[in-house]
Amino acid sequence: MRLRHTLTLMTAIVLAAAAIAAVALSHPAAAAQGLPAPASQGGVDDDTCLACHDTPGMQITLPSGEILYLTVDRVTFKTSTHGRLGYACVQCHTDISGFPHPEQMATTRRDFTLQMYTSCARCHEEKYQATLDSVHQRALAAGNQQAAVCTDCHGAHDIGPPDQPRTRIPQTCQRCHSEIYARYKDSVHGAALIGEGNPDVPTCIDCHGVHNVQGPSGGPFRLYSPLICARCHGDSELMDKYAISTDVFDTYVADFHGTTVVLFEKTAPGQETNKPVCIDCHGVHDILPPDDPGSTVIKQNLVQTCRKCHPDATTNFPSAWLSHYRPSPEHSPLVYYVNLFYEILIPTLIGGMSIFVLSDAVRRLRNRRREEARHG
């Protein structure tokens, strides 16, 4: 009896392994990426769909008067991410099982998009859930039907790697945020990425997130923005490539502005702060090199930047700021030597006073014992 159960169990394991191997062999790309294997639904394969939908000019007119294009180019789909991995049309269009198709209920093209994009959640549940906390979904829930959804960024039948090339990331955001993109492409970050192809500089998603996109309208985003900047500017290996000091974050946290912001983070993390963070001085999407004539932190323009918070600031007001340099003989030598003087003086005084007090206590103790011995 025990032998029979053992043989049955081994047979089941072998059959399961064979089934998994068959799926992996039939869809090697999906298996390699750890994705769920494509499943046939309703017996409708892609060739059946494309026999009609690969026809140029297929379209219907929606009640709004808009044209909904139904043509799907075979080559475009087959070379897309889903096409290469072997996913079937009916895995997204789950209401299609034959012809004629169910009546299309969307009244506008946007309605159709909003009806269809949730199908992404079937395979990409984790990423879909992340979007629900994003500024895009909050805007959509508030009634803004133009807020971005999955297919606005990734496409539908032409989905490809969203970051290849890396310039594709800001160009995707440009579709809705064209004015911000125009400022970004001329900034120190955008010019390096778009103009020079430098992959080390941040794109939109490095600061705002990918699916859980956050924006400056939320207080915590601005409050924690120095930590976003520190991801790159605190990375010594990355900054060494461009001869940029990594003291930027530490010197900011050490001065009055940064210390106050850090305290604010700990005491009221969900509230807005009125203390300046990186973007208040350097800009947001339009950050320029600090030696650029248009930079907000170049010496000639710095007093105007300070006056955003200090309206009475005089022309020599910025001189009180040490920039992002630690005091040294080369940068702020007076501050450096004053600090050095006190670093020597204070331990010497405290150490000297400690020795004096200790030696005096020892002397008094010895004197007391002598007196006791004399009178004993």
Image (cartoon, rainbow, N blue to C red):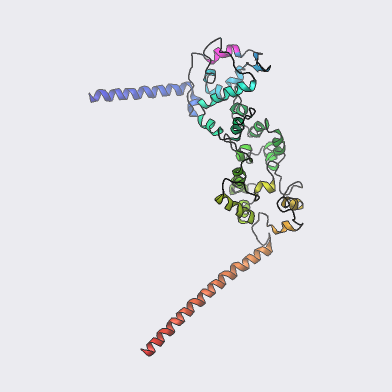
Main SS, magenta region, reads helix
Residue sitting at x 54%, y 24%: 119
Single out the residue that lies furthest toward the left: 1
Q: Residue at x 44, y 85 (%)?
A: 367
Instruction: Judge from the rendering whether residue 175 lies leftward or rightward of residue 125; answer left or right.
Output: right
- Please identify the quarter of the rendering in which residue 23 is found: top left
The stretch of residues the image draws in magenta is 45-52
Count the marks: how many? 0
Residue at 46% from the left image edge and 79% from the top image edge: 361
Residue found farthest to the front: 142
162 sits left or right of 26 in the view: right
When the figure is inspected, residue 372 is found, relative to residue 108, above or below; the finding is: below
Relative depth, front residue between 308 and 19: 308
Regarding residue 232, the answer to whether it shows in the image is no
Query: Where's residue 206, x and y in %?
Result: 60, 39
Pick the residue in front: 268 or 192.
Answer: 268
Quadrant in which the C terminus is drawn: bottom left
- What is the x, y in percent for residue 37? 47, 23
Instruction: Please provide percent x and percent y for residue 98.
Output: 53, 11
- Can the viewer see residue 361? yes
- Is 57 inside the magenta-drawn segment? no
Q: Between residues 298 and 195, which one lies in front from this camera angle? A: 298
Which image quadrant for residue 371?
A: bottom left
Task: Assign the N terminus to one quadrant of the image.
Answer: top left
**Residue reaching furthest to the top:** 100
Q: Relative to residue 239, is residue 289 drawn left or right?
A: right
Q: Quadrant of residue 251?
A: bottom right
Residue 28's x, y, as percent? Answer: 49, 24
Tell me if residue 374 comes above or below residue 320 in the rendering.
below
